Image (tube, grey):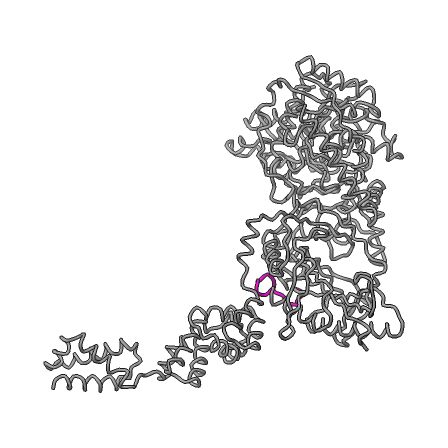
Amino acid sequence: MVDEAYRVVVGLEVHVELKTRTKLFCRCVNAFGSAPNTQTCPVCLGLPGVLPVLNRNAVYLAVKAGMALHCTIRSVSKFDRKQYFYPDLPKAYQISQYDLPFAEWGFVPIADGAEVKRIRIRRVHMEEDAGKLNHIGQNLKEAEGSLVDLNRAGVPLIEIVSEPDMGSAEEARRYLTELRTILSYLDVSDLRMEEGSMRCDANVSLKPRGYQGSLEDLPRVEVKNVNSIRNVGRAIEYEIERQAARLSQGERIIKETRGFDDGRGRTYSQRSKEEANDYRYFPEPDLPPLVLDESWLTEVQASLPLLPEAWRERLRDLGLASQDVEVLVQDRVQVAFLSETLSFTDDVRAVSSWMLSDMLRLLNERGLGFDQSPVSPKDLVDLLGFIADGKISGRMAKEVLDKMFESGESAAVWVKRLGMAQITDDSLLRGQVAEVLAEHGKVVADYRAGKERAFGFLVGQMMKRTQGQASPEVVNRLLKEALEFDAQ
Amino acid sequence: MMGVPDYSAKGLADAVRSGQVSAESAMIGYLERIRATEPEVHALLAQDQDLALSRAQAVDRMPLDQRSQLALAGVPLVVKDNIVTEDFPTTAGSRMLEGFRSPYTATAVERAAAQGAIVLAKSNLDEFGMGSSTEHSAFGPTKNPWDLTRVPGGSSGGSAAAVAVGMAPLALGSDTGGSIRQPAAFCGIVGLKPTYGRVSRYGLIAYASSLDQIGPLARTVEDVGLLLQVISGQDVRDATSVENPVPDYLAQLKRPLEGLRVGMPKEYFGQGIDPKVRSVVEKMLDRLAAEGVTVVEIEMPHTRYAIATYYLIAPAEASSNLSRYDGIRYGFRAPATDLDSLYRNTRAQGMGEEVQRRILLGTHVLSAGYYDQYYVKAQKVRTLIRRDFDEAFQTVDLVVTPSAPDLPFVLGSRSDDPMQMYLSDICTVTANLAGLPALSVPAGFDDGLPIGMQWIGPAWSEDLLLRAGYMVEQMVERPRWPLWRT
């Protein structure tokens, strides 16, 4: 078992597909799930004579991500060719960034209770994705053949490389969760691990107590392409146990690449890294250096949204409980919704409590997110206004919210339609009756002169003033009382 | 004999525009010339006579106001077979791409076609542009039209030979280390390698991306300028093409150059240069001096590292650029039992010896542990070579050298000696390493074999190079056609 004899050292490499309209070096559509090889052109097929042209929007999204991870952005970086043969790599090299990545030296803060630990980011670089092989048959060994789908070839990626700063599977999970949350705020990627738009490789090693050498020299096991945050945690936990067991039996850890078997919860050996690939990196001669203008960088920095860390602080300052803050901050669209309500109300607690209970329930029932809610932030604030003004009870408000969800109509409409907001309190209406009579002296005189129709006009005025919420019965009675009283 | 092929491209385009000559009748003349000369010269890999004729008829049918807009109305064009075309197969002279047809056309070809040029054939070349003799074509060598026992130079030997015998007045070539200029010199015609970034490389099958440029070949300097005019300019599909206005190359062409200062780097006139070549070039320089051109001897001390530098950088890039020919998606595929043997057999059988030699060389150069020592070092020397030129252009307008160290050599005489073959590029590789424009123009003849002189200028000085070339052209007597049968 793992004990104090070892310290766990985990570093993660995360690939994130950027949500651009087109691919990184050509104008093919960047979309998931189309029929094989329908989103291809001579450039991403690597046909003879083609040249890459950099997608500036991909650069914009990548730089946003680099900034949100607190990286230093290089004003001059370059692209390099990483060379290896594989059928899913049409040019037999991947255009990537080697020694001059566009972003370096950032961090992701992860919280453990009140304590915040910074997981350092070593580098973030841009590269193109490879295609996909579909093997005919159950598995590669028995496959009758393999079909190449190059729809994904050339899709823009960023690779985010952390320092080996994580000391447990739990920290790795937190790091990934926070990383995903941060990136979701920027809207730079779909971040769907199951679709491969976010992919994670975990480097796991155990550092024996008293080890003096560099972490780089520890035999490192890389677990490739795990398909969910939960499974990354499981894979790391399994690796820690496996390596600890080997070490305690006096065996050596082999530097290798391993896969993760989801069903059995185990990692398995894929290939030994002892005979490491020589990728023969060299500068991509088809692309000029990537030069980022200082003023453009300043603009991008200024356009960044408030990030999760900042939102946490803001919401806590507004008086929300930490647990609620955490739940709200997890989801960009929740925060956006909440943020919009703040322009109409100060009562963030009421908003948050309604959002996380009834709103969330109603949205979940419909499979919707806060960004697709039929009830807008303003609608919700209006509803809460009726409660605050004592016009309806909380229980009534739930009923109104249900109706609002079904119909998309406002709180006011449903409060009235359900007859919840009739003003029946004499004292609330008496002052207005006096005002109406004072304003329309001629009509009052007409009424007294026997014109019955004049009474109807006065009722209408009352209804108009109360936006139809006054109870007509009460208005009739109070008007008559007042007219008679004045007459005496 | 005075036939259709005697027209210059300029003269033909003028005549077709005005309706004086029909594009169709011109095309028939060129096709006849091809029939008469191609069996012995073997300059071409693919031709489509029906297509060429129907295109010519289409030019003739155009309304006059449309046709009169076309700079190359009805002018036949030969395209080196490492430049992709939808209408013809593109092989790059390799088994690897035998029968390959590109689904798109190179920008330079599109631009020429948009101006009325008609591609009538693809021309032979050293496989993937790697060679200086066109002997390294998988489809047999091209012969020098001035002496069929000799090579036409390379790698654009097919384009140069085709133009020299009048199969077309214009050809496109590509130049990575001299592949336009050396064959132009060997075939007695004019060839220009533009400034790096002047002409789009989109659709040029990459050999060494940081050195490759497409450029024109023609029998006259004016025609070279005419074709350059049409193919130049930035292309959104090539990020290394430069947004720099394209001047009117023909406007000043014939105006005498006054006060021109020309540098004669002694490194290009010494050891390794055939005395006959040197004497013809020096004689021309004397005649220019008599016309008022100032000729000064200059030093370019890093020239002696140029071949070594070139043969590190070019193969390094080639090893990467040619990796895509793996038998998976298109082109040749050898029988195999698994993925590894598929790659190995395909590339071993699909590529010629010289190509494999350069791929191995380049792979070695880029390998871990050698990269700094070779590739990085070569890049540094490349900077020094560029600086030699910068310094030279502080004192002179243009630099003059022979276009090639020797006369066209006998077929097969250097096949077993790659080192000797690599030295054929000694005069030309520096312009590629420095990214500079360079023009080869005939300077004279020795015993019936043409000798070219090379003019190298600062970046974007194509207009000046053309004027200098035109001046030389006026002083050289040359036979109208090289071949007995023309």
Q: Position of residue B258 (x, y in %)?
A: 62, 17
Q: Indicate left or right for A421 with B31 as reference.
A: left
* Of the pair A32 and A336, the residue shown nearer to us: A336
Q: Quadrant of residue B351?
A: top right
In this rendered view, identify the residue nearer to me: B393 or B365: B393
User: Residue lying farthest left?
Assistant: A449
The residue depicted at 43 percent of the width and 74 percent of the height is A381
Q: How many marks?
A: 0
Q: Quadrant of residue A300?
A: bottom right
Does residue B354 appear in the picture of this structure? Answer: yes
Residue B220 visible from this viewpoint = no
Q: Give the camera-side residue of B75 and A160.
A: A160
Left or right side of B280 for A392: left
Residue A191 on the magenta segment: yes
Task: Find residue B397 and report its image quarter.
Answer: top right
Residue at point 71% right, 22% down? Answer: B263
Q: Position of residue A340 (x, y in %)?
A: 47, 68
Return the x and y of residue A86 as percentages of the image width and height. 77, 56
| Quadrant of the image containing the C terminus of chain B | top right
Q: Is residue B375 above or below residue A95?
A: above
Residue B276 drawn above or below residue A73: above
Q: Which segment is the magenta one?
A: A183-196
Measured from the top left, where is residue A166 in percent x and y?
Answer: 72, 68
**Magenta region includes residue A224:** no
Image quadrant holding the N terminus of chain B, namely top right
